[in-house]
Image (spheres, helix red, strand yellow):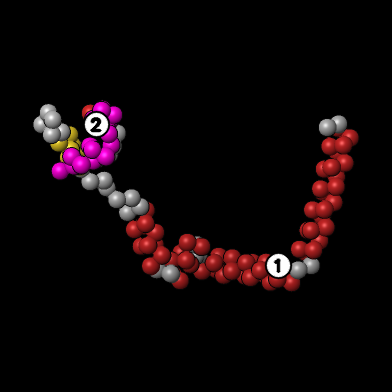
Amino acid sequence: MSKLAEFKALEAQLAEQLKQLDVLKNDEGLKREIEFESKLRALMAQYGMSLRGIITLLDPQRASRAEQKATSSRRERQVKTYKNPHTGESVQTKGGNHRVLKAWKAEFGAKVVEGWLQ
């Protein structure tokens, strides 16, 4: 794309964005939100409160829910024990990425090896 074409495209985008900005400036809903935010920030400054403090004040259980969610986001894997009936060898693993277990699955098949689960 030539520089001139790129310039004209950007100029057209800018004109469109300026139109959208004018529409937003005249929107009553936006004016009310801006007024609310400025009054809220002034009130927060007057009482020395932070936004986090206000959220905790309005919803005290939110912090405990967030803490529970962060700590218990994934349950711990259970240890599984597989015992090979041909050799009597046993393998303990928490996942399927064990070297011996993979070899058994390649040799005997995954369904057969899952049947060896103790």
The kind of residue on which mark 1 rests is Leu
Q: Which residue is mark 1?
A: 30
Q: Which residue is mark 2?
A: 108
Q: Could you tell whether 77 is left or right of 46 in the image?
A: left
Prevailing SS of the magenta stretch: helix
Q: Quadrant of residue 60?
A: bottom left
Q: Which range of residues does the magenta coloring cover?
A: 101-118
Q: Could you tell whether 75 is left or right of 61 in the image?
A: left
Residue 68 visible at all: yes
Relative to the observer, which residue lies in front, 100 or 60? 100
Mark positioned earlier in the residue sequence (2 or 1): 1
Quadrant placement of the N terminus = top right
Disc 2 versus disc 1: nearer the observer: 2
- Residue 5 x/y as whole percent: 87, 37
- Residue 51 x/y as whole percent: 51, 62
Q: Could you tell whether 61 is left or right of 34 in the image?
A: left
Say which residue appears at 13% left-offset and 34% top-offset.
Answer: 85
Residue 90 visible at all: no
Relative to the observer, which residue lies in front, 56 or 103? 103
Instruction: Please check the rendered image and state whether residue 83 is part of the magenta-colored stretch, yes or no.
Output: no
Q: CA distance from mark 2 to mark 1?
A: 67 Å
- Residue 97 x/y as whole percent: 29, 33
Say which residue appears at 64% left-offset and 66% top-offset.
Answer: 38
Instruction: Please check the rendered image and state whether residue 107 is part of the magenta-colored stretch, yes or no.
Output: yes
Q: Could you tell whether 8 is left or right of 20 in the image?
A: right
Label 1 Cα neighbours within 10 Å, binned few <14 / some 14-19 / many ≥20: few
Label 1: which secondary element: helix
Depicted 39 relative to depicted 7: above or below: below
The kind of residue on which mark 2 rests is Phe
Say which residue appears at 34% left-offset and 58% top-offset.
Answer: 68
Determine whether label 2 and label 1 are within 8 Å by CB.
no
* Residue 102: mark in rendering: none
